Image (tube, rainbow, N blue to C red):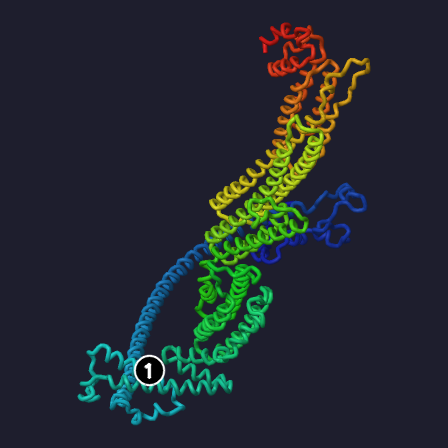
């Protein structure tokens, strides 16, 4: 054991720092340490060693330490322990060495870092110095550049002044030539006569002219000494005159060349001349000369061709549609011509917009104005043209189509191009005189149409009257009444007005003007409809008056012969038939009035209201209400006459058909007759027949009001009629049957107040049926109105005196 330790202690150093460099493996290091100490295991099979090279004590399932009793378990353990201790010591020494080296390296790094920082600081100082040097260099370069630029500006200015001075000297020399002698242009430089240098000559002439005119205008500038004392003393008046003559001659020469090139369609030559002429009054003469030379302005046949195209052989009687077609064709031809001229103008003139302005203005003022003068011959309002020749309406229609088509032409010309010219404004100026008086002409036209229509209707009525052999009973035989009201005629009034409103919209560009014109035109319609309907209602009322006059004419007394009475009765039947016919006619008139007013209101709602401002809208509504009220007032008077006519016939039927025995049935043992009386049957049949037209003609509140008034009059008339008779109990029953018949008929009136009155009559009729002693109790608790009517009826009982009913009703009378 001692020898083993000694040998282990004397082992050489086997660990070195190099062993830990590179791909270090602990297993390899450990194997290198122990393999030399275990030689007995080196020859074993590989299966007896583990992956580290250490012998596996277990092999084939048997522990080697048990193979012999005298063999130790691990013989090399002492050596290995000594080796491991030395190795640990070696490793500690290595660690100390490494720590020492690390400290040395750290110190070296700190020293190098300090040197590096110092070097960087020195470099930064060097860079800053370099930047400053560059800044000084850049500043120097900028200063040198500015100096060079100033030198260049001075050189350029000096060169410009040199050129100006040279040009001025040349201009002074040319000016001396023009100022030499009055009217003498023969001694001028070749520049002013050389056709190849016309542009240069024109430019110089304009400069000389401006300079000379300025000198003459100020009277304070003298020519330089080089011109000469003599010329300087008299100024430049001669030069101005000579320059003017030369410029005129040059301008004429260029215009002649321009015309020649224009005839040959040499656009390049034309453009060259136009460019030179632009120096003379900005080329105005060339522009105007070109426009004036256009064939459409100088050909005398153009005007007659235009008029013939629009008016044809019939003139203003050609018809609005034909005139509109002619204008459209003419304006299209004008637009095409202007468009073709525009292409030439764009290629020739340096300021084409100015030329287009002159061209379009000339077209409107010459061609368009000429045709409009022929179309718009304003008629006199004091002496209107006859309706059979078109009347004012023809003028207004031609005015409208002319305005509309001309407005379209102006828009087309504006789109083609007309520079700063307001083509639409210029077009408007052609119609100013017509538009200013337009509202008066429109109203006069509507009145003329209305008067013509009324004359036509009167003529038809007169012709119809003569053909039927009837005689007009109107107040003035020379002015017969018009026929029955026609909704078609009112619709025609509305069509006239709608056409006029369309023209108002066309001619009125401002909303205020439009509202004013629309209101005045619509006012004409209100007047026409109101007057026509009122006249128609008055005519229908005249028929009612005539029927009433016939009734009054055949009223006879009681003491006449049977023959006279029969004739009077026949005449009364004829008067009744006339009354019934006039009643139906008036109801038809009222129905047509209602339809006409509905058309008027619908037209206002659909067409007029949207064109009016709020204040004008309210005023129109008020005017329309006033017009309708006039019609309603006339209708109300007629309806009252209708009620009078109906009641007159009812009273006649009651008077002629009601017999005394109807309500005083004789006591002959026969059963009482429960049928209505013949008078009741006739009256109800008449009312049913005649009121059929009223039920269909009247609507709403008008119908309710009429039937309520008629019901009240019928109730009152029946009560008054029955006051003439004496009633027996059986007669009272028949009276109740009549009242029931009347009540059932008036129920169709849908008037609760009338139904109530006839129901009360039925109650009152019970006064004829009950016994005298039951009368007081019969009406006990009834309203005062019923008791009052009952008292009047009770007095009509045939037993009123014999049964001493008067004394029985003392308390009843006092209560009522």
Tag 1 residue: 206
Name the residue at 71% across, 20% down: 660
Question: Residue 709, located in which quarter of the rendered image?
Answer: top right
The part of the image, by quadrant, that contains residue 322 is: bottom right
Q: Position of residue 733 (x, y in %)?
A: 74, 17
Q: Position of residue 131 (x, y in %)?
A: 35, 66
Location of residue 813 with respect to 226 vertically, above or below: above
In the rendered image, the quadrant that contains the N terminus is top right
Dot 1: element? helix
The front one of 275 and 334 is 334
Q: Report x, y in % for residue 628.
A: 55, 41
Q: Residue at x 79, y 16 (%)?
A: 672
- Residue 367 shows up from this direction: yes
Pick whichever, 480 or 521, lies toward us: 480
Q: Residues within 10 Å of mark 1 (few under 14, many from 20)?
A: some
Side (left or right) of 260 relative to 793: left
Q: Position of residue 587 (x, y in %)?
A: 64, 39
Which quadrant is the C terminus positioned in?
top right
Q: Nearer the viewer, residue 313 or 13?
A: 313
Residue at the front extreme? Answer: 561
Question: In this view of the protein, can residue 356 be seen by the observer?
Answer: no
């Amino acid at each position: 054991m001692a020898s083993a330790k000694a040998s282990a202690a004397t082992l050489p150093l086997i660990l070195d720092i190099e062993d830990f460099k590179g791909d270090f493996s602990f297993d390899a290091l450990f194997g290198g340490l122990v393999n030399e100490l275990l030689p007995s295991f080196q020859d074993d099979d590989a299966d007896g060693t583990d992956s580290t090279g250490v012998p596996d004590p277990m092999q084939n399932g048997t522990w080697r330490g048990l193979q012999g009793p005298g063999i130790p378990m691990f013989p090399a353990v002492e050596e290995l322990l000594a080796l491991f201790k030395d190795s640990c010591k070696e490793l500690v020494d290595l660690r100390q060495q490494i720590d020492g080296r690390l400290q040395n390296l750290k110190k070296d790094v700190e020293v190098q870092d300090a040197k590096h920082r110092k070097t960087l600081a020195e470099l930064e100082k060097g860079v800053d110095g370099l930047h400053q040097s560059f800044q000084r260099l850049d500043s120097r370069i900028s200063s040198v550049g500015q100096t060079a630029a100033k030198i260049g500006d001075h050189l350029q200015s000096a060169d410009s002044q040199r050129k100006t001075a040279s040009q001025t000297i040349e201009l002074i020399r040319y000016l001396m030539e023009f100022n030499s002698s009055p009217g003498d242009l023969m001694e001028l430089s070749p520049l002013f006569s050389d056709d190849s240098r016309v542009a240069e000559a024109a430019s110089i002439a304009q400069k000389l002219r401006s300079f000379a005119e300025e000198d003459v205008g100020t009277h304070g500038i003298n020519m330089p000494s080089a011109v000469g004392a003599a010329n300087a003393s008299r100024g430049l008046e001669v030069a101005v005159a000579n320059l003017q003559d030369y410029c005129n001659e040059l301008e004429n020469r260029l215009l002649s060349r321009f015309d020649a090139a224009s005839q040959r369609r040499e656009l390049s030559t034309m453009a060259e001349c136009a460019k030179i002429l632009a120096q003379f009054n900005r080329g105005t003469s060339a522009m105007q000369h070109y426009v004036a030379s256009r064939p459409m302005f100088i050909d005398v046949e153009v005007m007659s061709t235009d008029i013939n195209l629009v008016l044809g052989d019939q003139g203003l009687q050609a018809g609005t549609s034909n005139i509109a077609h002619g204008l459209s064709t003419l304006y299209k031809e004008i637009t095409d011509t202007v468009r073709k001229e525009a292409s030439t103008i764009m290629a020739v003139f340096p300021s084409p917009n100015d030329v287009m302005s002159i061209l379009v203005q000339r077209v409107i003022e010459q061609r368009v104005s000429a045709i409009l003068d022929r179309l718009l011959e304003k008629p006199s309002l004091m002496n209107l043209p006859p309706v059979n020749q078109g009347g004012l309406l023809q003028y207004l229609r031609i005015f409208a189509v002319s305005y509309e088509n001309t407005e379209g032409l102006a828009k087309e010309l504006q789109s083609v191009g007309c520079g700063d010219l307001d083509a639409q404004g210029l077009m408007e100026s052609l119609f100013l005189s017509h538009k200013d008086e337009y509202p008066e002409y429109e109203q006069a036209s509507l009145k003329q149409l209305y008067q013509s229509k009324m004359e036509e209707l009167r003529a038809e009525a007169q012709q119809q009257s003569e053909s039927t052999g009837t005689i007009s009973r109107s107040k003035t035989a020379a002015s017969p009444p018009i026929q029955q009201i026609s909704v078609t005629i009112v619709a025609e009034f509305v069509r006239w007005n709608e056409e006029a409103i369309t023209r108002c919209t066309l001619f009125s560009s401002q909303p205020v003007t439009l509202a004013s014109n629309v209101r005045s035109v619509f006012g004409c319609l209100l007047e026409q409809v109101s007057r026509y309907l009122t006249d128609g209602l008055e005519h229908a009322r005249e028929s009612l008056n005539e029927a009433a006059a016939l009734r009054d004419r055949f009223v006879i007394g009681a003491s006449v012969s049977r023959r006279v009475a029969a004739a009077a009765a026949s005449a009364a039947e004829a008067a009744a038939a006339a009354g019934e016919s006039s009643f139906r006619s008036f109801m038809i008139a009222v129905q047509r009035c209602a339809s006409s007013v509905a058309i008027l209101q619908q037209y206002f709602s659909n067409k007029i209201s949207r064109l009016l401002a709020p204040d004008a809208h309210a005023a129109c509504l008020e005017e329309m209400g006033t017009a309708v009220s006039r019609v309603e007032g006339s209708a109300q008077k007629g309806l009252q006459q209708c009620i009078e006519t109906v009641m007159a016939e009812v009273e006649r039927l009651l008077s002629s058909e009601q017999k005394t025995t109807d309500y005083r049935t004789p006591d002959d043992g026969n059963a009482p007759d429960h049928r209505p009386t013949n008078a009741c049957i006739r009256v109800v049949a008449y009312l049913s027949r005649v009121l059929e037209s009223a039920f269909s003609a009247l609507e709403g509140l008008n119908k309710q009001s009429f039937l309520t008034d008629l019901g009240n009059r019928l109730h009152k008339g029946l009560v008054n009629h029955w006051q003439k008779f004496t009633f027996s109990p059986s007669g009272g029953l028949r009276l109740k049957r009549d009242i029931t018949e009347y009540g059932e008929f008036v129920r169709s009136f849908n008037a609760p107040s009338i139904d109530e009155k006839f129901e009360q009559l039925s109650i009152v009729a019970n006064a004829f049926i009950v016994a005298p002693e039951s009368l007081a109790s019969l009406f006990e608790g009834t309203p005062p109105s019923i008791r009052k009517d009952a008292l009047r009826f009770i007095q009509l009982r045939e037993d009123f005196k014999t049964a001493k009913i008067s004394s029985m009703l003392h308390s009843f009378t006092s209560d009522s």
